[in-house]
Amino acid sequence: MFAEVRVAVLASGAGTILEAILGESIEVSLVITDRPCKAMALAQSYGISSKEITRAEFGKKFDRPVFTQQVVQALKDENIDVIAMAGFGTVLGESFFQAFEARVLNTHPSLLPSFPGWHSVRDALQHGVKVTGCTVHIATLEVDAGPILAQRAIEILSNDDETSLHERIKAVEREIYPETIKRFIETLEKNS
């Protein structure tokens, strides 16, 4: 099924996760962003095909199915097999997860299933837990609910605030996410 696994990265920010992925010699065929961002410039500096699908509307005016279909079409046009979410700021609709079922990876700054959602670092601190971490999982329509592929625990220090803890989590994320993507690709290749 997969002669050569083609990987796309969906990003919205500074591109630090994309940079970590590229630093592990994972061949990325396409980068998609939903806004102008540093990740796009990074992709271009590496000579990676890139596409900005701008999200112009927010709130009730945002047409998630249409936006999702634009993303799906861009991925299909490049014959993408595996997608790595890298801080992509737009939650995609059902057609995305149907088109790439069990082939979308994501990373999350907590030990899922604890603290899903956008404020997981803050939530961990507010709940007074002593350990949090990072999870790499298969992304599904239900946010932060897919099968877990890898996790790494991080002790919460007495002087941690949301910023310092999140930075420590991101450092771990940039280690385990590329490792997990590589293993995932190797498994696909072996089973094809």
Image: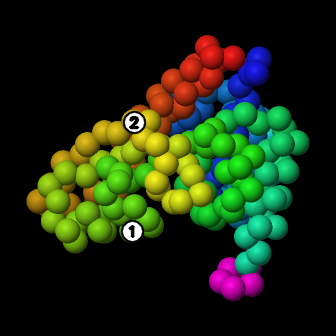
Which residue in the structure is indicated by mark 2?
A: 150
**Mark on residue 37?**
none
The residue at 77%/75% (across/down) is 63
Amino acid identity at mark 2: Ala
Asked if the magenta segment contains residue 76, the reply would be: no
The kind of residue tagged 1 is His
In the rendered image, residue 56 lying in the magenta stretch gets the answer: yes
Measured Cα–Cα span from mark 1 to mark 2: 20 Å
* Residue 91 visible from this viewpoint: yes
Q: Residue 42 versus residue 6: which sits nearer the camera?
A: 6
Left or right of 17 in this view: 1:
right
**Residue 119 numbered tag:** 1
Q: Horizontally, is 113 left or right of 45 in the view?
A: left
Query: Whole-percent x and y of residue 91?
Result: 62, 64
Q: Which type of secondary structure does the marked residue at label 2 adopt? A: strand
Q: Which residues are magenta?
A: 55-61
In the picture as drawn, the residue positioned furthest to the top comes out as 190
Q: Position of residue 149 (x, y in %)?
A: 44, 36
Residue occupying the far bottom of the picture: 60
Vertical relation: 73 (above or below) 90: above
Q: Residue at x 76, y 21 (%)?
A: 1
